[in-house]
Image (spheres, rainbow, N blue to C red):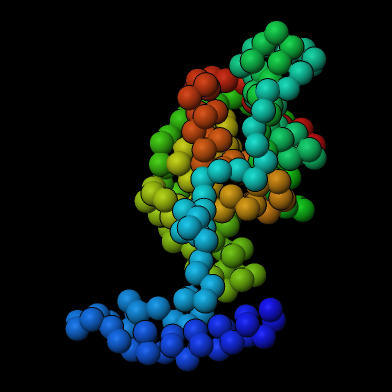
Amino acid sequence: MIRLISSAFLALCLMAPAAVQAQPAGQTSSESKTLLQILFPPSENYNKYRRSDKSPIKRKVISFKENHPEGTIIIDTSDRRLYHVTGKGKAMAYGIGVGRDGFTWQGKNKITRKAEWPGWTPPQVMRDRVKRQEGRVLPAYMPGGPDNPLGARAMYIGSTIYRIHGTNQPWTIGQAMSSGCIRMANEDVEHLYDQVKVGTRVIVRN
């Protein structure tokens, strides 16, 4: 059986280069398949999930017995969770990304503005820090869109520089990697955005 498989594999290896070379007129080399692609084709979901708006931490309704008015947002940076109180002892729990060491904060405030596909104006202190520590020059402004670090939606917290916003890096959800803003996967931030109004109370705790 092993000898039969080895023979078939060898035959395919001998045939594959000819198949690659025998391409229709006008077809570029980038359109032809390599031997590796022929033998081990990528999963049909490769392109579909290579870049995702889904969170690795699925949102869910949980029992929530804390005494907060319906609609309140509680951000627990230690748990890496955002709780949106829905009333009747329940809350929707979302996975979030939070500030890394030295960039965590806590306090009470309100949502003062909401924006869809927001533009990004990095604070000058951030631009200076990134240039000094990483040698990268951040843009003074970046228009909204799929490549924007603020993702699909943003909810601005008081007059602070902090926001609850989406991200085009869903693998950072559950991690402490931001400069203090609260990150959510785009699918989750869109879901929360539709439930939240300007004036919503926000509590950030460690």
**Is 85 situated above or below 107?**
above
Q: Position of residue 28 (x, y in %)?
A: 27, 82
- Residue 127 can be seen in this image: yes
Look at 61% across and 63% down and name the residue there: 129
Q: Quadrant of the N terminus?
A: bottom right
Front residue of this view, candidates 7 and 199: 7
Q: Position of residue 107 (x, y in %)?
A: 72, 31
**Is 16 situated above or below 42?**
below
- Residue 154 can be seen in this image: no
Asked whether, in this view, residue 171 is left or right of residue 197, the answer is right
Q: Quadrant of the C terminus?
A: top right
Front residue of this view, candidates 53 and 113: 53
**Is 32 situated above or below 105?**
below
Look at 59% across and 50% down and name the residue there: 170
Q: Residue furthest top?
A: 88
Quarter-wise, where is residue 142 in the image?
Answer: bottom left
Asked whether, in this view, residue 138 is left or right of residue 144, the answer is right
Asked whether, in this view, residue 26 is left or right of residue 100, the answer is left
Front residue of this view, candidates 108 and 168: 168
Q: Position of residue 11 (x, y in %)?
A: 51, 88
Look at 42% across and 42% down and name the residue there: 118
**Is 65 situated above or below 98?**
above
Front residue of this view, candidates 36 and 196: 36
Look at 64% across and 52% down and name the residue there: 172
Q: Position of residue 7 (x, y in %)?
A: 59, 87
Give the tally of numbered discs: 0
